[in-house]
Image (tube, rainbow, N blue to C red):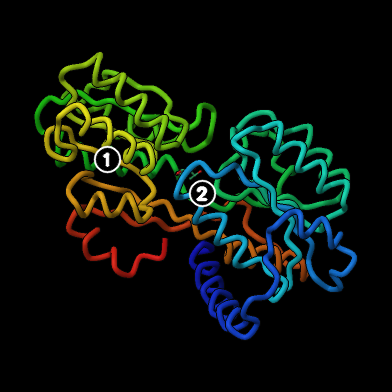
């Protein structure tokens, strides 16, 4: 399959990058937008100019994703990366994309904070003949010619896998579920909700009694969970759309004098280190992974396009899933 080809090639690219990285130990920090602005692209020679607009720094997943992109799209690997953090605001992303268009970069890549409202700026990129690559999150534009490809996980599938695990392992008797949703309007929040509902709608034991956004952050996950606990004395399971909100929920549950993972079960998505540690510690019950290491695949896609090749319009990354025993086993060699 396409995704496997990319993974294999991406792994080869990673090895090459690592080797180069060792040789060029301490070379200039890519991704620092002020450094890039100062150098102005005038010294970039044959480097491929890429503008990347990141969602923000809302979670452990995002930190790992940013690191993967900055560690891979380096000068040593043939890239001049301009990187900006939109602080979870769509207007900041639109502004960053417009500035990349004005600078005449070769490629624009971005992870759209929400699904809607991108057509105008993507049309501007198209008019400027700058190919756009969506990483991690989708847009809902009808016009598929506005971007070359979308690389990232299948979020509906992630929610479905959580729902199936809940059906088999917890909802064998009636349960009250509270849901901590991701950022309102974002692809992973919409799709993970959908996938879970698809998997559990045929199970009369699953009752979702409350559902609210925690914006993918630990702090908001905690606050929303505190509200859920106050309003509902009888919660059996928390479905968190990411690990950070699950970790916030753990704090709220412990503060309320209950035992997370036992009195109230928790399932979440991502598989970042802190989440996996909580899973190994028995405070989370099941995690479906969402792989944030998209840098090597992104580099591979851009190099393919740059040498005149074509890529598939949708590239799905591979995700694992972990119960408590599997988390204990995986933790020592976990990369993020
Ligand atoms: O699950 C969450 C992050 O878009 C897949 O965004 C990503 C999600 C990830 O904030 O932790």
Q: Residues within 10 Å of mark 1 (few under 14, many from 20)?
A: many
- 211 sits to left or right of 206: right
The yes-or-no answer for disc 2 within 8 Å of ligand 1 is yes
Image point (63%, 76%), residue name: 26
Relative to 327, residue 22 above or below: below
Q: Position of residue 217 (x, y in %)?
A: 44, 36
Question: Which mark is in front, 2 or 1?
Answer: 2
The circle on residue 287 is none
Q: Position of residue 122 (x, y in %)?
A: 76, 39
Q: Residues within 10 Å of mark 2 (few under 14, many from 20)?
A: some
Mark 2 or mark 1: name the one nearer the start of the chain: 2
Q: Position of residue 35 (x, y in %)?
A: 76, 59
Relative to 325, residue 96 above or below: above
The circle on residue 267 is 1
Image point (41%, 33%), residue name: 219
Q: Position of residue 85 (x, y in %)?
A: 65, 45
Which residue is at the far left? 173
Q: Which residue is mark 2?
A: 62
**Badge count:** 2
Q: Quadrant of residue 209?
A: top left
Q: Which quadrant of the figure contains the C terminus?
A: bottom left
309 and 323: which is toward the camera: 323
In space, the residues marked 2 and 1 are separated at their CA atoms by: 19 Å
Q: Kindly state the secondary structure of the residue where label 2 is placed.
A: helix
């Amino acid at each position: 399959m396409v995704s496997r080809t990319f993974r294999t090639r991406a792994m080869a690219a990673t090895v090459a990058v690592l080797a180069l990285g060792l040789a060029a130990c301490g070379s200039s920090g890519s991704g620092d937008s002020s450094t890039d602005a100062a150098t102005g692209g005038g010294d970039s020679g044959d480097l491929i100019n890429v503008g990347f607009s990141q969602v923000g720094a809302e979670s452990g997943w995002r930190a790992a994703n940013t690191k993967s992109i900055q560690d891979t799209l380096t000068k040593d690997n043939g890239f001049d990366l301009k990187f900006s953090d939109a602080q979870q605001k769509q207007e900041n992303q639109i502004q960053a994309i417009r500035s990349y268009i004005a600078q005449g970069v070769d490629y624009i890549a971005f992870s759209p904070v929400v699904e809607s409202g991108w057509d105008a700026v993507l049309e501007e990129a198209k008019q400027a003949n700058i190919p756009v690559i969506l990483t991690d999150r989708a847009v809902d534009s009808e016009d598929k010619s506005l971007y070359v490809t979308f690389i990232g996980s299948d979020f509906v599938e992630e929610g479905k896998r959580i729902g199936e695990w809940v059906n088999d392992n917890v909802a064998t008797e009636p349960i009250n579920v509270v849901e901590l949703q991701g950022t309102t309007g974002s692809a992973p929040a919409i799709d993970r909700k959908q996938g879970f509902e698809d998997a559990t709608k045929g199970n009369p034991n699953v009752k979702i009694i409350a559902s609210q956004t925690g914006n993918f952050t630990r702090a908001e996950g905690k606050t929303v969970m505190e509200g859920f606990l106050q309003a509902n004395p009888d919660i059996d399971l928390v479905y968190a759309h990411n690990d950070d909100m699950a970790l916030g929920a753990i704090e709220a549950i412990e503060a309320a004098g209950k035992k997370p993972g036992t009195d109230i079960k928790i399932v979440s998505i991502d598989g970042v280190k802190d989440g996996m540690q909580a899973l190994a510690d028995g405070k989370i019950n099941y995690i479906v992974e969402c792989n944030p290491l998209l840098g090597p695949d992104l580099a591979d896609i851009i190099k393919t396009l740059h040498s005149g090749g074509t890529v598939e319009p949708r590239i799905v990354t591979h995700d694992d899933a972990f119960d408590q025993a599997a988390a204990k086993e995986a933790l020592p060699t976990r990369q993020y």
